[in-house]
Image (cartoon, rainbow, N blue to C red):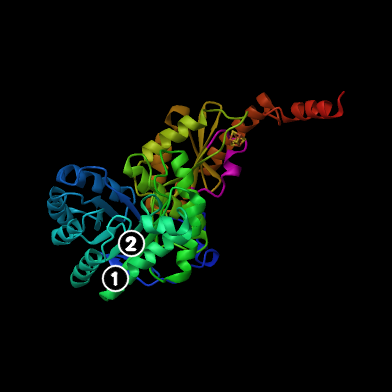
Amino acid sequence: MNAPASSTGDTSAARYPRRATRQIHVGKVAVGGDAPITVQSMTVTKTADVEGTLQQIYALAAAGCDIVRCTCNEPEAAEGLAQIVPRSPIPVIADIHHQYKMALAAMEAGVHGLRLNPGNIRKPEHIKAVAAEAKDRGIPIRIGVNGGSLDPALYEKYGGIRPEAMVESALQEIAYFEDVDFHTYKISVKASSVPLMVEAYRQLSEVTDAPLHLGVTEAGPPPAGLVKATAGIATLLMEGIGDTIRYSLTADPVEEARAGRQLLEALGLRERKNVDLIACPSCGRAEIDVIDVANRAMEAFGDRKIPLQVAVMGCVVNGPGEAREADLGIAAGNKRGHLFVKGRNVAVVPESEMVDALVEWAEYIHEHGTDAAIARVDTTLAEREAAKDRAKLLDDKGDDANHATEKIVEIRKTVSGS
Ligand code: SF4
C-alpha cells in the first residue's frame, strides 16, 4: 500500500518541545520519555462481569485507547481481572481506592499497572507494602491525586484545594515509594476546575521528572465536558507537559477514547489513524444540509482505519477551493455531488450517493494514493460538469449568496442614523 500524501505536515515536535520525563512501561506500552503520548480510558462495567468488561475494552481499543483502567473495589473484581487481563488487547490498570488489599489482589490477578489515590489510602505502611510488592513484580503505579478527595490534613494546611496541596500530596506519596526503592511511577493531579489542574500540573512538572498523566476529573457530559477536558489537557500538552491523557466524560467511555485520540491527532502529537472529517460551516450558498451529510459521512467511516482528511462542502462554487488541502472532498451543486481530490474535480455523482462515493474514493486513495486516484479518471469531464454547476449557482444566487452587501448597507444606515 502506498502511503497517501497527507495535507497536514507534522511539526508538533518543533512547536511543542516536550518536557523530559523518564520512561516507564505499562505492559508493552511505554509512557514518558520519547514514547508517543498515550490515550487512556476506564471501563464502566462491573469488573466482575468479565465478558461485558472485555467487550468494552475491545471497543475502547478500536476507538484508539492505548491503556485501560478497571475498578478493583471488591474481591470479585480482582477475580474478574484474573480472567480479563490475559484476554485484553491493551494493558489493564487496576483502580484502587481505600483498600490497599485490593491492590495486592489486583497484582496477584496479573494487572499491568495500579492507580492509587493518596487521599484514600493514607497509612504509610499500607502504601509501602503495595509499592514493595509492585517493585518485586515490576508493576508501575500511578499516584492519582484528585482535588475532590484530597488528604484532609493537606486541605486544612492550605485552606482548601490548592495546586500546592495537590503537589504536596503527590510528593508525600513519592517519599513513601522511594523509602522502599520503588521508582516506576507516574503521577496525576486532576481537578474538575481547569485553571486549578493546569496550575497543579505546571507546578508538579517543575519538581519531578516522573511521567505525568493528564486529566480534568468529572468533566461532565459532552459537549461541556469535552470543552473542559480539552481546555485543560491541550493547554498543558502545548506547553510540553503530559505523557498520557484521559478524558473523564459522563458518556460512553468509547467517546472518551475517541476524544483523546482526536485531540492528539489534532495537535499533531499522534499520527492520524482514522478519517479527519472537516466540513464547511454552511452559509446561504449551501446546496445541501451540510450537518446531515457530514454526520452521515462520520457514521459511514465509523472506526475504519483510513488516515485521510475528507471534506464535506456545502457548495461547488467555493467548496473545492476552500478545501483544496483536503485529500478528498465532496461539494454539492445542482442536486449533484462533485468529488474532488486535492482540489481537482474527479467525479460527479447524484446527491443521494454522495456519502457512498466519499467512502469508496477514500478507500481507493488509502490503498493507492491521491495521484493514482486522479489518474484513474478523465478529470476534464468532472471539471466541465463542476464549472457548469458553479455557473448555474452563480446565476441563481449571484456573487453574494449571503446577502452581505444588503446587510452592510443597512448597517451603514443604522450607524449614520439615516
Ligand atoms: S461558500 Fe459553499 S463551501 Fe463555503 S461555507 Fe458557504 S456553502 Fe460552504
- Horizontal placement of 56 versus 186: left or right? left
Please, is residue 338 above or below residue 215 in the view?
above
Gap between marks 1 and 2 measured at Cα? 10 Å
Type of the residue with mark 2: Ile
Name the mark on residue 122: none
Q: Is mark 2 within 8 Å of ligand 1?
A: no
In the rendering, at what x and y percent does residue 374 appear?
Answer: 48, 48
In the rendering, at what x and y percent does residue 155 appear?
Answer: 42, 55
Span colored in magenta: 313-327
- Horizontal placement of 301 versus 227: left or right? left
Please rate how many residues cluster around mark 2, counting C-alpha atoms within 10 Å: few if below 14, some from 14 to 19, many from 20.
many
- Horizontal placement of 188 versus 82: left or right? right
Q: Does residue 307 appear in this view?
A: no
In the rendering, at what x and y percent does residue 82 appear?
Answer: 13, 55
In the rendering, at what x and y percent does residue 411 appear?
Answer: 78, 28
In magenta stretch: residue 325: yes
Q: Does residue 161 appear in this view?
A: yes
Type of the residue with mark 1: Phe
Q: Determine the main secondary structure of the stretch shown in magenta.
A: loop
Q: Quadrant of residue 67?
A: bottom left
Q: Secondary structure at mark 1?
A: helix
The residue lying toward the viewer, choosing from 374 and 360, is: 360
Query: Dots 1 and 2: beta carbons under 8 Å?
Result: yes
Q: Is mark 1 within 8 Å of ligand 1?
A: no
Please rate how many residues cluster around mark 1, counting C-alpha atoms within 10 Å: few if below 14, some from 14 to 19, many from 20.
many
The residue lying toward the viewer, choosing from 1 and 145, is: 145
Q: How many marks?
A: 2
Residue under pointer 1: 177
Name the mark on residue 143: 2
**For marks 1 and 2 on the same chain, the one whose residue lies earlier in the sequence:** 2
Residue pictured at 45% horizontal, 33% vertical: 354
Tell me which image quadrant ligand 1 sits in.
top right
